[in-house]
Amino acid sequence: MKIATDEIASVIKQEVERFGAELEVSQVGSVVEVGDGIARVYGLSQAMAGEMLDFETQDGGTVRGQVMNLERDTIGAVIFGDYLGVREGATVRSTGQLLSVPVGEAMLGRVVNALGEPIDGKGPIHAEATRKVDLIAPGIVERQPVKQPLQFGVKAVDAMIPVGRGQRELIIGDRKTGKTAVAVDAIINQKHTHEGGGDGPVYCFYIAVGQKESTVAGVVEALREHGAMDYTTVISAGSSESAPMQYIAPYSGCSMAEHFMWKGKHALVVYDDLSKQAVAYRQLSLLLRRPPGREAYPGDVFYLHSRLLERATKLSDENGGGSLTALPIIETQEGDVSAYIPTNVISITDGQIYLEPDLFFAGVRPAINVGISVSRVGSSAQIKAMKEVAGTLKLDLAAFRELEAFAQLGTDLDKATQKQLDRGARMVELLKQGQYAPLDVIDQVIQIFAASNGFLDTLALDQVQDFAAKLVEHMHGPQRPIYDELADKKTLKKDGLSDRLKEAIADFKKTYEA
Amino acid sequence: MPATELQPEQVEIARVYARSLVDLADSAGKTDEVGDEMAQVSELIAQQPDLRVLLEHPALSDQERLDAVRNVFTGKVSELTMRFLGVVGRRRRLPALGSIARAVTDLLAERRGEVTVEAVFANEPSPERIESLMSRMGAALGGRSVQLESRVDPALLGGVRLRVGDQLIDGSVASALARVRRTLAQAGRNAGASHE
């Protein structure tokens, strides 16, 4: 880094001229007690709720804090960062400002903490602007309905649980069921939007709350390996960070994403995960002596999540038409979705992707239970061709699961039932997908089209994946014109495209079987 | 001010006791006398760590505490104050005595329209300087009479730091230097950004 000496000289000159003439007038209080990231401060009678504070530390530095409780003679405050240097009796200054974080293009590709400070060892961030962390979500007039698809690149999601730009889709499941994997796949799949595909580039924000540092490092590495870090910011408040940092991290990340949204761009935010944020908030609420409620969570734990997720928006065209899609993640205990936090977040979001350990261990990965996973935005977030091929997929799979239960009884089955069972088994097989292997939406349409038209029925189960992969290769190669036409028109119903596609697949199947 | 005197619960309790004592002193016409005595009690507690320990030690019984306080103050304070100490002791509030004494002095100062200004100087100030500071502060605070609690802290390097209630007016060289340092660091960062 080079330093412009003339610039610094001018600053020094200005400072020297003003030296002594300037008085610093501020509101101060003193710390009565401090511990666990919480401080009680005597004085500061003019302090406002949510205001930033500067705590003096033992070594003469300062740490930031925020006013949480206003009481008669004291205020309850949280401390962001290292609270061990703050001692009883230390001076606390009010700043008259609200907490804000750096935002802008400079944040992309970086790993930062909850305050937007870099923690990836790549030097300081020269952000173009700052934005307040806790902002009110846009109102009705500023929005429009969700209508553009946000492609996950995961067949099971894009076909049956379509997510639109500006939607809030919950990813819920037990530990070790691949929740993060689904979200990371969605981030990696946004690469095509930065290469001219889709409805404009999607900038991604991965917010890790209460995660192991090693897990976060793994995610960052995966993103970097797949070229996704170029358009992604990782905000990490690991499990070793104090509760206030974990509590504030989702809001910081949301603000960074909102900056893009208000510039008419698209953002995708993954909150991994909100159950840990709720636990951090419970901790600091109890330490602030706020009364506990159900499961010892404070009374405003619903508002904690609703005000965060309400900030996911599809803005109206007058406001630039930007969007912020939120993918909150919730970890359940033993599949219990009726616990306090899961029910809260389920009721806030526009649908959920439910992951099950049983499916995961049966080899169905991603382990999405399509029966109870829904997207309330529905097919308005799908391209036409996908709507056409996936329309009945969900019902077919439901019927298959019902029959499957019967078939296990070992009764003799009639031909039609057997056929339905075969079709279902191949569908399930087709929907399996490797990690970090997102699939383009047109490729997905071709594969699902082949399956729902019975081309897979005569194949052995272990051939399904191979056939589907080679079919896509074939469509990209010799049958490129049909592929391009489909990608262009985005529907199968015009100009007999559907028949020509069938023909092409039938031809390919002959050579495949030969 | 020791931090235990700032515990909100204690401050609350101290206010109640202080108000009742001041009211009683008013009706007996001994406000100034009681005020002086409580100021002395406050000072004594602040200067005698042993007395603080005696008042706050959890292993002592309330009776022992009360006896000790009686021994210390009998004959040295007026009858009203003595009786007040007895009530505080019987109500088991002696650990809060420091807060109560301070609350009494604060209450009386407030009534007299006095403001306490804490001033920290870099070196021993001359009497003229204190005089001019006090008169100027008094004018700035709308003509109220100013009580100056001054202290010397060489770490300030120069200038003065004043505190009135929650308001801090910092005219010290040390904080001006800290401000220059912050501005320079900021300018350095911005310059780095534009030359990268």
Image (cartoon, rainbow, N blue to C red):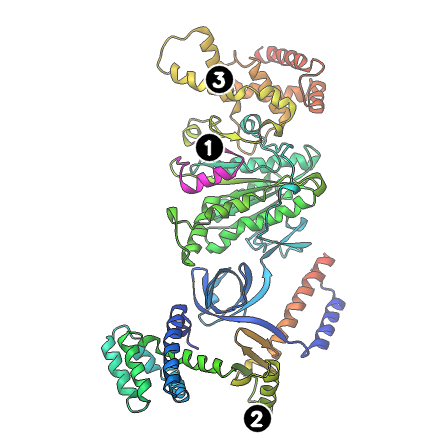
Residue that sits furthest to the top in the current view: A415
Same subunit, labels 2 and 3: the answer reads no
Instruction: Identify the element where label 2 is drawn.
Output: helix
| Screen quadrant of the C terminus of chain A | top right
> What span is in magenta?
A335-356
Residue A347 is inside the magenta segment: yes
Read off the chain for label 3: A
Read off the chain for label 2: B
Q: Which residue is mark 3?
A: A424
Q: Residue at x 41, y 49 (%)?
A: A297
Disc 2 marks a residue whose amino acid type is Pro
Q: Residue at x 46, y 17 (%)?
A: A400
Q: Residue at x 66, y 12 (%)?
A: A499
- Front residue (pair B148, B184): B148
Residue that sits furthest to the bottom in the current view: B127
Disc 1 marks a residue whose amino acid type is Leu
Using a 10 Å C-alpha cutoff, classify the residue at mark 2 as few (fewer than 14 neighbours), some (14 to 19) or many (20 or more): few
Say above or below: A63 vs A225: below
Judge from the rendering whether residue A413 lies leftward or rightward of residue A103; answer left or right.
Answer: left
Residue A355, numbered label: 1
Read off the chain for label 1: A
Say above or below: A213 vs A30: above
Instruction: Identify the element where label 1 is drawn.
Output: strand
Q: Quadrant of residue A33?
A: bottom left
Q: Position of residue A116 (x, y in %)?
A: 59, 54
| Screen quadrant of the N terminus of chain A | bottom right
Q: Is residue A152 visible?
A: yes
- Alpha-carbon span between mark 3 and mark 1: 19 Å
Residue B127, numbered label: 2
